Image (cartoon, rainbow, N blue to C red):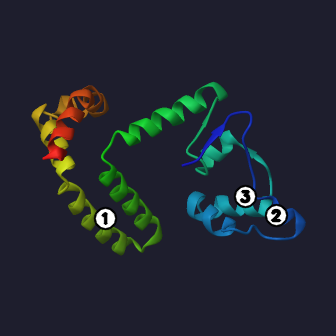
Amino acid sequence: MIFGELGKAVFAQPEIGVGIIPGGGGTIRVPRTVGRRRAMEIVLGGHDFPAELAELYGLINRALPPDKLTLYVENLAYRIASFPAESIALAKKSVLAGVELPIVDALLEEQHLFGQSVALPTSKARMKMFLGVEGQSREMEANTNTLLEEQDVNAFSIFDDIEKE
């Protein structure tokens, strides 16, 4: 993930200006991230562009004001760290397969990894808790993030007990 500070972060692939192409994967990773047309503009144009435009192009996740950047990234990191490590690893593996493999192979890999994730003891406990508070009702689905955050304090102690068994 990449975050940029509004008014400070500047992005570019300026190599064309001196007669060379970007190295280090610049002509490979940029089009995979932003698409062919945007990549041509970035690589062939050689312009600097601010964080706002990098966010709009999809080159970075978010462009945030200086006073919000660290807080946002810290909160996101803590949120991710609050989820089961095994599930995070499987999700990352699936996302990478989605961009690296042909679509049919990626879908098969996702199905395989999904099966692994639902078999995890921690996942079973979390799904049981979610269903126990009627998480699949129309009302609760509209507030899933709030529901999970409210349940996290109590749920983690339950998960810790389950994982010890």
The one of 89 and 135 positioned closer to us in this rendering = 89
Tell me the residue at 31%/69% (across/down): 109
Q: Is any atom of residue 136 visible in this view?
A: no
From the image, tell me which residue sits under label 3.
Answer: 42
Circle 2 SS class: helix
Mark 2 vs mark 3: give the one in front: 2
Indicate left or right for 39 with 120 as reference.
right
Q: Position of residue 65 (x, y in %)?
A: 64, 29
Q: Position of residue 2 (x, y in %)?
A: 58, 47
Q: Which structural element holds mark 1?
A: helix
Q: Residue at x 39, y 41 (%)?
A: 81
N-term mark: 3 or 1: 3
Circle 2: residue type? Glu
Residue at label 2?
Answer: 15
Q: Give percent across and percent down for residue 72.
A: 52, 32
How far is mark 3 from mark 1, CA to CA? 32 Å
Name the kind of residue labelled 1 in the image: Glu
* Numbered circle sitting on residue 110: 1
Frontmost residue, 5 versus 105: 5
Q: Residue at x 40, y 57 (%)?
A: 92
What is the residue that sits farthest to the right in this orientation?
A: 18
Q: Determine the secondary structure under disc 3.
A: helix
